[in-house]
C-alpha cells in the first residue's frame, strides 16, 4: 500500500464522521480540517533496498491534523471529534491494504520544530502516524 492510499484512508474516515471538509495538504483559507503529511519513517535496516523493491518496503507516515475554524472552541471540537473517530476505528481496510492509525503524543519541542519548519502559526493540533499493516 502506498503512502497516498494511507493518507486517503485517514481522509475518508474523518470525512465520514466530521461536519466539515477534510483536506490533505497545507492549510489554506478554507475552513475545515487539514491533514498535513509531515514525515516518512522507514526502518534503518530497510533503507538500502533497491528501487525495484520499493513497493514492498514497510514505512509509516506522520500526519498533523490542523483545524481551520472560525473560533478556538470550534477548532478544539474538531480535534476532539477527530481523536474520538480515530480511537473508535484505528484500523482501516481499503482495496489496497490495511492502515493502522496511531495517535502520537508529540513533545512541546517537537511541535515547535514542526510549526517553525512548516512556517505555520502555532495552534492546537493532533499528530498521528499511519502504518501499513
Image: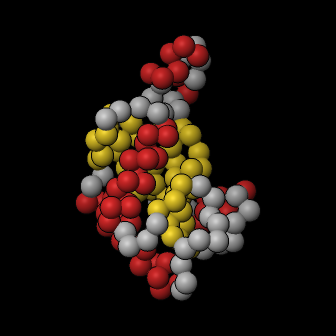
**Looking at the picture, how far across and down is residue 46, in whole percent?**
52, 22
Image quadrant containing the N terminus: top left
Instruction: Look at 30% across and 52% down and name the residue there.
Output: 90
Residue at the far left in the pictured view: 88
Report whether 28 appears left or right of 8.
right
Q: Nearer the viewer, residue 35 or 121?
A: 35
**Looking at the picture, how far across and down is residue 88, in whole percent?**
25, 60
**Looking at the picture, how far across and down is residue 10, in whole percent?**
40, 52
Report whether 58 appears left or right of 86.
right
Instruction: Look at 47% across and 33% down and name the residue there.
Output: 2
Determine whether 116 is above or below 68 in the image: above
Determine whether 18 is above or below 37 in the image: below
Q: Can residue 65 be seen in this view?
A: no
Report whether 43 appears left or right of 25.
left
Count of number-bearing discs: 0
What's the coloring here? secondary structure
Q: Is residue 110 visible?
A: yes
**Looking at the picture, how far across and down is residue 133, in whole percent?**
34, 35
Q: Nearer the viewer, residue 95 or 123?
A: 95
Instruction: Look at 49% across and 40% down and name the residue there.
Output: 4
Determine whether 93 is above or below 77 in the image: above
Instruction: Look at 59% across and 45% down and name the residue there.
Output: 39
Determine the image quadrant of residue 107: bottom right
Amino acid at each position: 500500500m502506498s503512502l497516498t492510499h494511507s493518507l486517503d484512508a485517514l481522509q475518508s474516515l474523518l470525512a465520514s464522521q466530521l461536519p466539515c471538509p477534510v483536506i490533505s495538504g497545507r492549510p489554506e483559507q478554507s475552513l475545515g480540517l487539514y491533514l498535513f503529511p509531515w514525515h516518512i519513517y522507514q526502518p534503518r535496516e530497510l533503507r538500502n533496498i533497491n528501487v525495484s523493491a520499493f513497493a514492498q518496503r514497510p514505512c509509516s507516515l506522520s500526519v498533523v491534523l490542523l483545524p481551520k475554524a472560525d473560533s478556538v472552541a470550534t477548532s478544539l471540537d474538531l480535534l476532539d471529534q477527530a481523536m474520538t473517530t480515530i480511537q473508535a476505528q484505528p484500523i482501516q481496510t481499503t482495496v489496497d491494504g490495511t492502515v493502522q492509525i496511531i495517535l502520537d503524543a508529540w513533545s512541546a519541542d517537537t511541535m515547535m520544530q514542526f510549526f517553525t519548519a512548516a512556517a505555520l502559526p502555532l495552534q492546537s493540533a493532533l499528530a498521528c502516524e499511519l502504518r501499513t499493516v
